[in-house]
Image (cartoon, grey):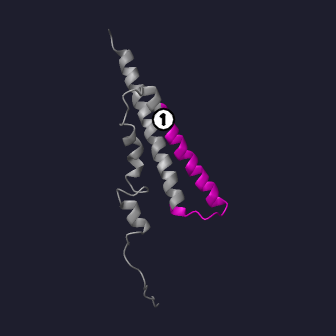
Amino acid sequence: MRIESITGLTGPTAGSSIQRLTSPSSPGGIESITRLGAETNKVEGNQDFGQMLSNVLEQINGAQQKSAAMVTDFAKGKPVELHQVMLAMERANTALQLTVQVRNKIIEAYQEISRMQV
């Protein structure tokens, strides 16, 4: 059995998908997944907790809707790259999982406070 050599392959270039994914400054980079949580730490002086929570939930909803739109576009055969669809789905999923875990911690803290004796 003869195996033909593969030619023309080079390492990642400055504009390649791999370089963009691993670049911290890239809008689609790995650190963009945690950017949503980091943005919640920037609270304005007049913004209350309810407003901040509402803003975060709107951002998560937007990520979910963007992911669904990309899946629909891909299914319709529009020019959408599969890796971009998968990244959008994973970002939306990670943001939703983070939200659920924060909710669970808030409920756990509330239950702990309610069990305290005064």
Residue placed most toward the observer, 3 or 19 = 19
Judge from the rendering whether residue 74 lies leftward or rightward of residue 39; answer left or right: right
Q: Quadrant of residue 46?
A: top left
Magenta span: helix, strand or loop, mainly?
helix
Q: Residues within 10 Å of mark 1 (few under 14, many from 20)?
A: few
Measuring 43% from the left and 84% from the top, which residue is drawn there? 8
Q: Please, is residue 63 above or below residue 4 in the view?
A: above
Q: Tell me residue 117's x, y (percent).
A: 33, 10
Residue placed most toward the observer, 67 or 105 = 67
Circle 1 SS class: helix
Q: Residue furthest right?
A: 76
Please state the extent of the stretch shown in magenta in the rendering.
54-83
Measuring 51% from the left and 60% from the top, which residue is drawn there? 84
Q: Please, is residue 44 above or below residue 33 in the view?
A: above
Q: Tell me residue 112's x, y (percent).
A: 36, 21
- Residue at mark 1: 55
Which quarter of the figure is the C terminus placed in?
top left
Q: Please, is residue 86 above or below residue 34 in the view?
A: below
Measuring 54% from the left and 58% from the top, which residue is drawn there? 85
Q: Mark 1: which amino acid? A: Asn
Magenta residue check for 57: yes
Q: Tell me residue 75's x, y (percent).
A: 65, 59
Q: Residue furthest bottom?
A: 2
